[in-house]
């Protein structure tokens, strides 16, 4: 999100101002440069709507160490993989990661989701906290995964199937997990 509206990352350049979503920071951060980095390896697909308030607007492909912001805290996206709403995939051939270089550390809006950019200064109290996965984030992902499974069944014209609902158990990610059991409609 630039000062003049949405713009594709490949069209950003030095001097463009991006909306910063970091508490206590100026509302915009200046782009110092853009790096296009050829990348081979695992990428993380974050499905549309998983991060709350319909964010992201479209699926996002992120590198595993990318920080995503949820309720004021930054999480390493690779730690959020559940296999349904947030999936690890292999990068396609000729995949290029785009690194946005900013004047300082900030969360910026990308497809409605807030992504962490830059490195916080340890002496600064005005930055997002990068935290381990917690119950709030685990619950959000589990609920969105269940919604995705229910919508997939509805798209096929089938009644909801308990086999398609995600039941999270300890050991499926590095985060503390919970069991999610949703009541199924009768009929």
Image (cartoon, rainbow, N blue to C red):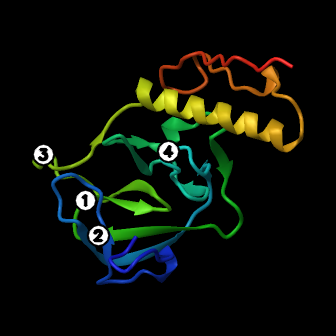
In percent of width and height, residue 122 lies at 15, 46
Cα separation, mark 4 vs mark 3, equals 25 Å
Foreground of the two, 122 or 180: 180
**Residues at marks 1 and 2 touching, judged by CB atoms closer than 8 Å:** yes
Left or right: 143, with 74 as reference point: right
Foreground of the two, 91 or 40: 91
- Tag 1 residue: 105
- Tag 3 residue: 125
In the image, farthest residue toward the left: 123
* Residue found at x 25% / y 70%: 29
**Residues at marks 4 and 3 touching, judged by CB atoms closer than 8 Å:** no
Q: Earlier in the sequence, mark 4 or mark 2?
A: 4
- Tag 2 residue: 102
Is 94 rendered above or below residue 24? below
Q: Earlier in the sequence, mark 3 or mark 2?
A: 2
Q: How would you rate the neighbour count of disc 4 (Cα within 10 Å): few for under 14, some for 14-19, many for 20 or more? A: many
């Amino acid at each position: 999100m630039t000062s003049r509206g949405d713009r594709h990352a490949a069209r950003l350049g030095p001097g463009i101002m991006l909306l910063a979503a970091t508490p206590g920071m100026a509302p915009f951060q200046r782009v110092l440069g853009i790096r296009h980095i050829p990348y081979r390896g695992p990428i993380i697909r974050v499905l549309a709507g998983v991060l709350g308030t319909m964010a992201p607007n479209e699926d996002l492909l992120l590198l595993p160490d990318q920080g995503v912001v949820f309720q004021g805290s930054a999480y390493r996206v690779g730690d959020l993989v559940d296999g349904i709403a947030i999936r690890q995939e292999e990068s396609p051939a000729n995949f290029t990661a785009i690194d946005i270089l900013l004047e300082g550390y900030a969360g910026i809006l990308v497809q409605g989701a807030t992504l962490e950019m830059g490195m916080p200064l340890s002496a600064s109290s005005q930055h997002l906290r990068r935290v381990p996965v917690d119950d709030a984030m685990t619950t959000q992902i589990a609920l969105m995964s269940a919604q995705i499974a229910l919508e997939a069944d509805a798209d096929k014209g089938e009644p909801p199937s308990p086999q398609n609902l995600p039941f999270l158990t300890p050991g499926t990610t590095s985060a503390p997990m919970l069991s999610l059991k949703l009541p199924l409609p009768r009929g």
